[in-house]
Amino acid sequence: MVGALGLAVDIGGFNALVHLGEGGLLGDQPLLAKTVSLVLGTTVAYVGNRVWTYGDRPRGNLAREYTLYMVLSAVALAIALGCLAVSRYVMGLASPVADNISANGVGLALGGLFRFLTYRRYVFRQDA
């Protein structure tokens, strides 16, 4: 549920910023739009993970935990941005379908796998 909510904020925010209305608020800046939407989605997911998913784990230093969470999320963001950049600027694909497949399909799948492998081990440790 936490991941689904964070994903909804990310994908919904991205599409609203890039494709809503005539050209979207950031229609000509899809990488910036993806960065904004992913940071918002990641923050929502952090709160949900800290409170619900890993709420039973010992609480470490909040500043350390949140910083590490965001640093690892930045790596996942780079993965999603790389996929979107290749689609937009290398392959020349700029449709809403192409953006969503590259950034929110391939990019988030690879970034999600990275997060899954790192959050449990480094952020929400059993022995915090």
Image (spheres, helix red, strand yellow):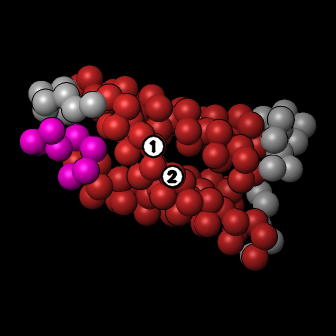
Q: Is residue 86 above or below residue 13?
A: below
Q: Position of residue 62 (x, y in %)?
A: 32, 28
Q: Secondary structure at mark 2?
A: helix
- Residue 79, position as x, y percentages in the image: 53, 63
Per the rendering, the mark at residue 98 is none
Residue depicted at 21% across the width and 52% down the height: 121
For the residues bearing labels 1 and 2, Cβ distance under 8 angstroms? yes
User: The residue tagged with tag 1: helix, strand or loop?
Assistant: helix
State which quarter of the image contains the C terminus: top left
- Depth check: give the residue in front, 120 or 59: 59
Left or right position of 16 against 128: right
Residue located beneath label 1 in the image: 70
Q: Amino acid at mark 1?
A: Met
Quadrant of res 85: bottom right
Residue ID at (9%, 42%): 127
69 displayed left or right of 85: left
Q: Which secondary structure dominates the residues rendered in magenta? A: loop
Q: Nearer the viewer, residue 125 or 53?
A: 125
- Residue found at x 60% / y 66%: 83
Residue, far bottom: 90
Q: Is residue 119 above or below residue 63?
A: below
Q: Which residues are magenta?
A: 121-128
The magenta stretch spans residue 126: yes
Identify the image quadrant of the N terminus: top left
Which mark, residue 74? Answer: 2
- Residue 6 position within the rendered picture, expressed as x and y whole percent measured from the top left: 45, 35
The amino acid type of the residue labelled 2 equals Ala
Out of 104 and 53, give the one closest to the viewer: 53
- Vertical placement of 10 versus 106: above or below? above
Number of residue marks: 2
Distance of mark 1 from mark 2, alpha carbons? 6 Å
93 and 76: which is toward the camera: 76
